[in-house]
Amino acid sequence: MRAKITLLTVAAFLCLAATAFAHPPKVMDVSYDEQTSTLTINITHTTTNRTYHFINRIDILVNGRLAEEKTFGSQTSNTMQTYVTRLKNVRSGDSIQVKAYCNRRGQKTASITVE
């Protein structure tokens, strides 16, 4: 019985420790080049294992409508996830919102208005 309690305590501690090291994206830099219709997204997200703890999804919304959903199986580097895509039919005054999701915990949202 005592061994069972010890095992459950250790298992609970390991589960809590794993989530303690998970964190949402820190900083997200979003820019849009109207001439090339290119959206560049740089997300600061530090990890020691980019295939275990990483940015796994980015949602791109234009004027509140989902324009693209991109999923990833790993992160670009141990400090950053970078994604570049083309968005057509985006005009001056349009709002672009980007949501980035950590596969372990948390998300970050950034918005820009095309000028």
Image: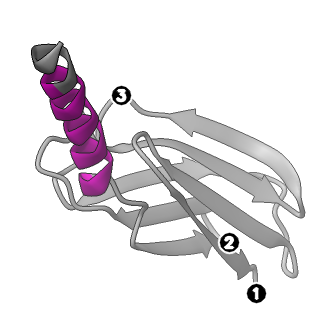
Q: Residue at x 86, y 73 (%)?
A: 94
Callout in the foreground (1, 3): 3
Helix, strand or loop at mark 1: loop
Structural distance between the alpha carbons of marks 1 and 3: 33 Å
Return the residue nearer the eye: 104 or 20.
20
Q: Which mark is residue 115?
A: 1
Callout in the foreground (2, 3): 3
Q: Which mark is residue 34?
A: 2
Q: How many C-alpha atoms fall within 10 Å of the one at disc 1: few (<14), some, or many (≥20)?
A: few
Residue 78 on image: x %, y %: 16, 53
Q: Which mark is residue 107?
A: none
Residue 40 on image: x %, y %: 49, 63
- Amino acid type assigned to the residue bearing label 2 in the image: Glu
Helix, strand or loop at mark 2: loop
Looking at the image, tell me whether mark 1 or mark 2 is earlier in sequence order.
2
Q: How many C-alpha atoms fall within 10 Å of the one at disc 2: few (<14), some, or many (≥20)?
A: some
Return the residue nearer the eye: 103 or 39.
103
Residue 54 quadrant:
top left
Question: Is 38 situated left or right of 84 in this image?
Answer: right
In the picture of the structure, the residue carrying the numbered disc 3 is 73
Region rendered in magenta = 6-21
